[in-house]
């Protein structure tokens, strides 16, 4: 299985999600799942995660400091089995790239793992204080537990 997490710039929520899920997969010795992240802000291509994302992950023994942001594209529908978006804007952006309804069947809101069918957005902590990053980390952590349970 191949999973992609998508957020606006791929510097806060999606690299945290990638790091958290990779960490959990490693702990469970699950090697059959690949995880990556992407975003839509072209000016952030190749940038490292936000320093607060790195800090919060590090406090939880997860190192995302070597991650670099990448852009979402149409080919991602062919590369990934599941695409998790963080909010409605991400959903609209992903939908823009979809070539057909089958592509969109792979897409879901990450928070639907915690509250199915509600399409709740996950607050973007970008430009916020560390506490916002902690709250976002905790929600992503719980959602990643659901992904692990489903494997």
Image: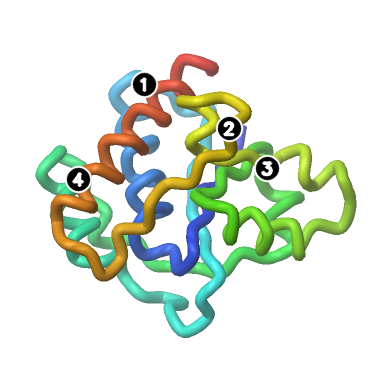
Q: Residue at x 31, y 69 (%)?
A: 48
Judged from the image, the secondary structure of the residue bearing numbered disc 2 is loop
Q: Residues within 10 Å of mark 3 (few under 14, many from 20)?
A: many
Judged from the image, the secondary structure of the residue bearing numbered disc 4 is helix
Q: Earlier in the sequence, mark 3 or mark 2?
A: 3
| Image height of 32 relative to 45, above or below | above
Query: Residues at badges 4 and 3 in contact (C-beta under 8 Å)?
Result: no
Q: The N terminus appears in which quarter of the rendering?
A: top right
Q: Viewer-nearest of labels 4 and 2?
A: 2
Judged from the image, the secondary structure of the residue bearing numbered disc 3 is strand
Give the camera-side residue of 86 and 83.
86
Q: Earlier in the sequence, mark 4 or mark 3?
A: 3
Residue 134 bears which disc, if any?
A: 4
Judged from the image, the secondary structure of the residue bearing numbered disc 1 is loop
Q: Residue at x 30, y 58 (%)?
A: 125
Q: Viewer-nearest of labels 3 and 2?
A: 2
**28 left or right of 58 in image:** right
Residue 88 bears which disc, if any?
A: none
Residue 107 bears which disc, if any?
A: 3
Q: Which residue is mark 2?
A: 118
Q: Which residue is mark 1?
A: 29
Give the camera-side residue of 83 and 67.
83
Q: Distance of mark 1 from mark 4, alpha carbons?
A: 26 Å
Q: Residue at x 57, y 25 (%)?
A: 116
């Amino acid at each position: 299985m191949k999973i992609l997490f998508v957020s606006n710039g791929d510097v806060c929520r999606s690299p945290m999600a990638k790091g958290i899920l990779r960490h959990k997969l490693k702990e469970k010795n699950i090697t059959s799942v690949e995880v990556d992240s992407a975003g839509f802000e072209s000016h952030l291509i190749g940038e490292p995660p936000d320093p607060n994302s790195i800090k919060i992950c590090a406090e939880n023994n997860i190192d995302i400091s070597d991650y670099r942001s990448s852009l979402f594209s149409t080919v991602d529908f062919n590369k990934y089995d599941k695409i998790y978006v963080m909010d409605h804007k991400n959903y609209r952006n992903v939908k823009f790239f979809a070539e057909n309804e089958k592509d969109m069947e792979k897409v879901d809101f990450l928070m639907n793992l915690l509250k199915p069918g509600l399409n709740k957005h996950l607050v973007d902590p970008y430009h916020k204080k560390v506490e916002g990053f902690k709250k976002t980390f905790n929600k992503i952590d719980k959602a990643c537990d659901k992904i692990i349970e489903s494997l």
